Amino acid sequence: MSRIDQLRREIAAKVAEYYRTAHASQPFVPGRTRVRYAGRVYDERELTCAVEAVLDFWLTAGPRVQSFEDRLARLLDLRHALAVNSGSSANLVAVTTLCSRRLERPLEPGDEVITPAVGFPTTVAPLVQNGLVPVFVDCQLGTYNLDPQQLEAALSQRTRALFFAHTLGNPVDLKAVTGFAQAHDLYLIEDVCDALGATYDGRPVGTFGDLATLSFYPAHHITTGEGGAVLTDDPRLARIAQSVRDWGRDCRCRHYSPPTGACGRRFEWEIPGLEEPYDHRYLYVEIGYNLKMTDVQAAIGLAQLDKLPEFIAARQHNFDCLYQGLKPYEEFLILPTWQARATPSWFAFPVTVRPGAPFTRRQLITFLERHQVETRLLFAGNLVRQPGYRHIEHRTVGDLRNSDRVLRSTFFVGVYPGLDDARLDYVLETFADFFSPFATP
Ligand SMILES: Cc1ncc(COP(=O)(O)O)c(C=O)c1O
């Protein structure tokens, strides 16, 4: 064994020992230990993989990013995955890709994109950034997904695309939505940031649209710290998306740098008006950004991917526990619902306080938080009411009544794999304590 290999082995052993010593989980003390809604779930493997990547010191997108992309594409059985530095960046790349002048039918400023009012702001921000007009439809309470019944009413001469998230891991009614998109020749982007592993009719969500996006922020199904990905089965869209991600350039050498380029004719590209051919590495064909992921992040992502099946199973187990435990309180709370054809991959457990309940959402979440049960709101609630979005150019369908209810009355608690049965029992006991002065089941 070379000295280098020996040193790497010693370092890996020390890192593993460090993990066991410094990162070991603390015993759960009910009422004192915070029951998080989400968090990184990792072991010595993520730490050693990250350190190995640091020792290689590639720093930027290198061979590990490529392996991570290959595995993501295989996971969803799609031809292309591009790793980026966040789910928000993935959404920006996806929307900007559909605006490319290299497409026969690009989205153009003023074109309308149907999207639900309930959701995360950076599903909608890239529409605004690209001069597109969001047309907000309402959601269904329980699934918190866009209401397909509203799609026809959202349609206009300018409607060109649909962009929606599978809210909190719960698949949208894809039969209705894909049928509508096909009937009206609309692009479809799936925001799968919260839904990695969910299926509809046995097929992974993220494979139904033209493009799909993922987030690897620590609250999500796998993490790279910050991170995300854009997925597509269409080589043309993949090529544009890569350009948008990589400064707008056309070159696809990635981390290799063969003297004549991956294209084999690196110095033979033309810029109109220039007598001499130009270097492909510096040929810019899109208005792009730099949204790439780094190799250290990808190293962690690769280790996380090995654990994805057990993560998804744990989330389902935790969801089932909370569902059974909260079912007796349905007179107060709307529990989550999902499509018969869908298998969700839960991000969290959402509930809505019913209008007639003898308490408010604020009272309930204040009680839970005071007893160390972490809660979160369903992101922006009704986005149209958020200060940053109130004044954007948009249309709405109907009165967005359910979205307003989400804004006022919905929240979620965690189902992430870091929760064990002791923590879940404690969450349910805390809910029961809160409900005890009211009608008991
Ligand atoms: C549905 C949805 N889309 C996009 C994002 C943005 O992802 P990121 O935080 O990685 O930018 C999130 C974040 O949680 C999300 O929930």
Image (cartoon, grey):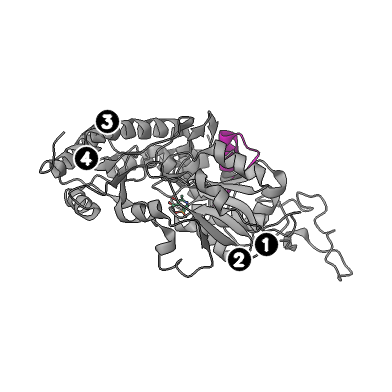
The segment highlighted magenta reads 66-85
**Residue under circle 3?**
324
Q: Position of residue 71 (x, y in %)?
A: 57, 37
Q: Dot 4: what SS?
A: helix
Residue labelled with disc 1: 108
Q: Is mark 2 within 8 Å of ligand 1?
A: no
Query: Of the residues under marks 3 and 1, which one precedes in the sequence?
Result: 1
Left or right relative to 149: residue 66: right
Where, by quadrant of the figure, is residue 435 drawn?
top left
Disc 4 crowd rating (10 Å Cα; few below 14, some 14-19, many 20+) is many
Identify the residue position indicated by label 2 in the image.
131
Identify which residue is drawn at 78% across, 61% down: 279
| Quadrant showing the C terminus | top left
Circle 1: element type:
loop
Query: In 3D space, how far apart are the residues under numbered discs 2 and 1 (Cα atoms)?
Result: 8 Å
Q: Is residue 60 magenta?
A: no
Residue 250, quarter of the rendered image: bottom right
Say which label, 3 or 2, has the lower sequence index. Answer: 2
Q: Earlier in the sequence, mark 2 or mark 1?
A: 1
Quote the CA–CA distance across marks 3 and 4.
Answer: 12 Å
- In x, y percent, where is residue 34? 22, 47
Q: Which residue is mark 4?
A: 427
Cα–Cα span, label 4 and label 1: 48 Å
